Amino acid sequence: MTALILGLVAALAWGTHDVCVRYVSQNNGIFAPLVWVLAFGLIIVTPISAYAGLHAPEGGDIGLAVLAGLCFGVGGTALYRAFSIGPVRLVAPVIGAYPILSVGWASLNGAPTTALEWIMVGLIICGVAYIAQSDTGHDHAEAPSPLPAIAWSLLAAVGFALTFAIGHKATATGGELLLLAPTRAAALVVVLGFALALRAPLALTRRHTPLLILMGTLDALAIGCVIGAGQTARPEFAAIGASTFGVITVLFAAIFLRERLRGSQWLAVLGVFTAIGVLGGGH
């Protein structure tokens, strides 16, 4: 149950973060906001990691943490790109499908996975997809192809699934706080490498600075929660809980952006959280 709670905290943080991604990426491109979000997050977690290193220097695998950060950098780049070219209702459910990979990986590594757990994972993914689905029937002929957004979303899903699987291995013996900074630094290096190779502008827009600081804080909190679940009995459940960020994003859009949900979509929201409760009931 602890892993699920950590995952839900991450979902709330990422859901809030992703409401902002489409706005900042469309106004600044993808690399400038992503670099600054990672940089601000790194500034926040570095003192925490340094304190942890002084008081608990043992535990954790820095090499695996760096590898997880590299995957997170790829996943983050793909996520920002997907949100910049595709609607939230399309991108969020595709990225939110990564629990299939997380649970599958755990199963391959010997974790007992029941049919009920697979059913609940499927319900969560289907619920997220239904809640975020597009209303069809208008401007269809003029709509751009969804394939590029789907491709970037799939890359993001794979990147995040690898991040969490490797991150859980890195923190299996402890050191969750110690490894926060190396993980984030590695992600920042990847994104900076992409940005420099593509000669993307990285100038910070002053009026967006408070928003980017908030996004960096939320992103650091989310990844810390999910990877920090590495010492729990079923760390993959943190990844499952975090996958509901798509639901959170759409709910926040309904509340703050006045994007209405149909009654059946509200029922799907209830179904998603019911499935999460069933998953956590026996753990």
Image (spheres, rainbow, N blue to C red):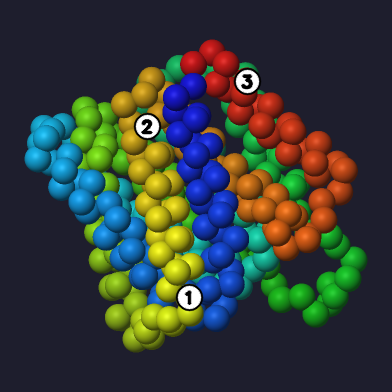
Q: Amino acid at mark 2?
A: Ala
In the rendered image, the vertical position of residue 168 relative to residue 212, given as above or below: above
Q: Is the residue under label 3 in contact with that under label 1 (CB below 8 Å)?
A: no
Q: Say which label, 1 or 3, has the lower sequence index.
A: 1
- The picture places residue 239, in percent across and down from the top left corner, at 47, 37
| Kind of residue at disc 1 | His
Q: Is residue 131 left or right of residue 207?
A: right
Q: Is residue 25 above or below residue 216?
A: below
Numbered disc 2: secondary structure:
helix
Please tell me the numbered disc located at residue 208. Answer: 1
Marks 1/2: CA–CA distance: 32 Å
**Residue 235 at x, y percent in the picture:** 40, 29
Q: Tell me the tag on residue 278.
A: 3
Q: What residue is pinned by disc 2?
A: 229
Q: Amino acid at mark 3?
A: Val
Upstream in the sequence, badge 2 or badge 3?
A: 2
Query: Is disc 3 placed on a helix, strand or loop?
Result: helix
- Which residue appears at 48% of the width and 56% of the height? 156
Q: Earlier in the sequence, mark 1 or mark 2?
A: 1
Residue 257 visible, this orientation = yes
Percent across and percent down for residue 194 are: 33, 74
